Image (tube, grey):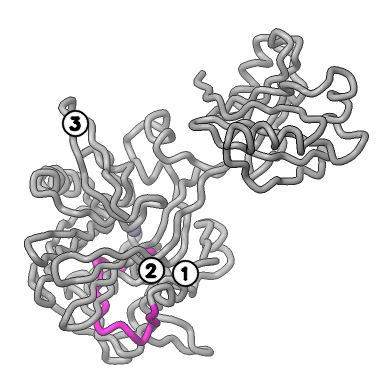
Amino acid sequence: MRAILDHVGIAVQDVEKALAFYRDALGLDVEAPEDVTTQRVRAHFIPTGQASLELLEATAPESPIAKFVDKRGPGIHHVTLRVEDIRATLDHLKARGVRLVDDQPRPGAEGALVAFVHPSAAQGVLVELKQAAPRRATLAAKSLSLGNFRLTVLHDGGFRLDGGAMFSVVPKPLWEKLAPPDDRNRIQLATRPLLVEAAWGRMIVDCGIGDKMGPKPTDIYALDRSRHLDHALSEIGLDASSIDVALATHLHFDHFGGATMRDGDALRPRFTRARYLIRAAEWEDATHPHERNRASYLVEDFVPLKDAGVIDFFDGDIEIRPGVRVVRTGGHTGQHQIVYVESGGKTAVFVADLIPTTAHLQDPWVMSYDLFPVDTLMFKKRFIREAIDREYLIVFEHDPHIAAGYIREAANGKRSVEQVL
Ligand SMILES: [Zn+2]
């Protein structure tokens, strides 16, 4: 069992007096108060490093905090320990005969789950257990310059996929620390197309997941497009008509669903002025799917582009535009490719599903979505070595929190990402 001190709750009698000390005299920042109506309590959080202080003010006479203060005066009310799995922790404590106030978790502030242990079991201290809500994907367009190019990592919303499928042969106790699953065993992912702006125009690499998904897959994949590509483009003063070239790493729906959109009953290209660049052999695979990849290739994502005559097919590893070249990796799909962007002696690489998130840095952490996982492994081993040695800036298309960074390797072989965006 592992627990981290989350906060110490302090029952206050007079919030002004409390603020006079913690805020004014000590000079600490106090967050905006949050009312927990079910408890008739107003909470004022004070960040203090890894853990916080929580000033608790009663908002009604029948509030447990009012009763606590009446009986014992103001003072420490509870200590909160954050655990990874609150249900497992409660089961474990119950099995050992520990007296609990709550034998089931209940909703707490900020989407967390909480439960109290009885003070008689904890040396007179009311212990609150808390399982934090899974963090939502950080979705904002973020830019940097690379030589003569401007790169912007865009976003087209978040979704979730089965954690077991995302890490394949890696046991759950190892991956769940890096990518906490929800109650349906799904982990949070992002969809982040890359925008390259150069003298020759604006290229978008992959197109996001799009808005054509029906209610059932929307539920299965927990698709959240409350913020999507239109928002991301407008954050940098652009819109869908600003794009000159759309390049596909492969044609799976979570990468190319945003290439087309509904227009009444019809489907049309999402980027109205763009040429769409697709590897011919990937097109062949996508239009001749088999049982194993059929769920990932949705014809409405790419066939309307052919009908509209906006596709330029190409073969092999070529320079698509000056400073932008594709390299086939295979593995994930037979023709999956990554995109090197090079300018001013610097290199950024959009790695798509070769390294979908920063939790996939170790060589054998390969998805079971991959059609040819050993090919992924072989390519990835070589590529990550090259990326570390040559300091490539890596864009992680599916990572919910880190959009881009440098892969670093410690002396003991442990890898991490130095976040840039
Ligand atoms: Zn993907």
132 or 183: nearer the viewer: 132
Can you tell me which quadrant of the image ligand 1 is in?
A: bottom left
Image location of residue 147, percent across then percent down:
14, 67
Could you tell me how far apart the alpha carbons at marks 1 and 3 are, in whole angstroms?
36 Å
What is the quadrant of residue 67 in the picture?
top right
What is the quadrant of residue 12 in the picture?
top right
The residue pinned by badge 1 equals: 228
> In the rendered view, would you say 93 is above or below 328?
above
Q: Residues within 10 Å of mark 2 (few under 14, many from 20)?
A: many
Q: Residues within 10 Å of mark 3 (few under 14, many from 20)?
A: few
Disc on res. 410: 3
Image point (16%, 83%), residue name: 200
Indicate yes or no whether the magenta region holds residue 152: no
Going from N to C along the chain, the mark reached first, 3 or 2, is 2
Image-based side of 169 in relation to 295, left or right: left
Q: Which residues lie in the magenta part?
A: 237-254
162 or 339: nearer the viewer: 339
